[in-house]
Image: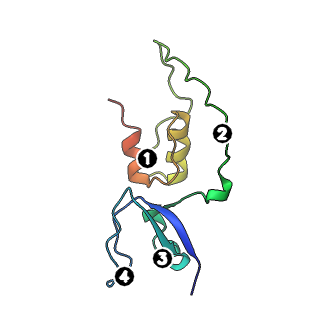
């Protein structure tokens, strides 16, 4: 039997016909095989031994400037690779870990 991996479900999925439905936003333990078959549906959770007992407090957030500068990276075409979209989103300060290309595009839409 393969090792079980604790993950956060990012997309609701039923890995096999006989498995129960794993809802997005929940944590679950899955096999390495399921993770390799459906990588877009899961984000690997940190193991408990990696957590620090006394985490350093986070630095205060920088205040937003009234005048925002244009991003250094130009907005890529919708057909561009996910790597280009990740670079663009990260230049805007968006964390792209575990996001699919369509989610990154949606996160970069200006209001």
Residue 9 image offset from top left, x and y in percent: 42, 61
Quarter of the figure that contains the C terminus: top left
Q: Determine the image quadrant of residue 73.
A: top right
Residue 75 image offset from top left, x and y in percent: 46, 37
- Marks 2/3 in contact by CB < 8 Å: the verdict is no
- Marks 1/4 in contact by CB < 8 Å: the verdict is no
Q: Which residue is nearer to you in this view: 87 or 5?
A: 5
Task: Give the mark nearest the N terminus, 3 or 4.
Answer: 4
Tell me how far mark 3 sits from mark 4, CA to CA. Answer: 9 Å
Task: Give the mark nearest the N terminus, 2 or 1.
Answer: 2
Determine which residue is flagged by label 4.
Answer: 16
Tell me how far mark 2 sits from mark 4, CA to CA. Answer: 39 Å
Q: Nearer the viewer, mark 2 or mark 4?
A: 2
**Horizontal side, residue 22 vs residue 80: left or right:** left
Mark seen at residue 55: 2
Q: Determine the image quadrant of residue 87.
A: top right
Determine which residue is flagged by label 3.
Answer: 34
Q: Which residue is nearer to you in this view: 108 or 43?
A: 43
- Residue in the picture at 61% in, 31% down: 58
- Residue 59's place in the image compared with 45, above or below, is above
Label 4: state its secondary structure: loop
Label 1: state its secondary structure: helix
**Horizontal side, residue 31 vs residue 109: left or right:** right
Tell me how far mark 1 sits from mark 4, CA to CA. Answer: 28 Å
Tell me how far mark 1 sits from mark 3, CA to CA. Answer: 24 Å
Label 3: state its secondary structure: helix
Task: Give the mark nearest the N terminus, 2 or 3.
Answer: 3
Determine which residue is flagged by label 1.
Answer: 104
């Amino acid at each position: 039997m393969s090792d079980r991996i604790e993950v956060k479900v990012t997309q609701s999925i039923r890995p096999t016909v006989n498995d129960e439905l794993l809802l997005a936003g929940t944590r679950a333990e899955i096999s390495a095989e399921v993770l390799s078959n459906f990588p877009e549906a899961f984000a690997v959770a940190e193991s408990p031994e990696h957590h620090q007992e006394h985490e350093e407090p986070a630095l205060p957030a920088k205040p937003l400037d009234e005048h925002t500068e244009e991003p250094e990276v130009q907005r890529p075409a919708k057909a561009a690779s996910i790597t280009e979209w990740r670079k663009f989103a990260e230049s805007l300060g968006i964390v792209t870990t575990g996001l699919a290309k369509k989610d990154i595009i949606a996160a970069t839409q200006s209001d």
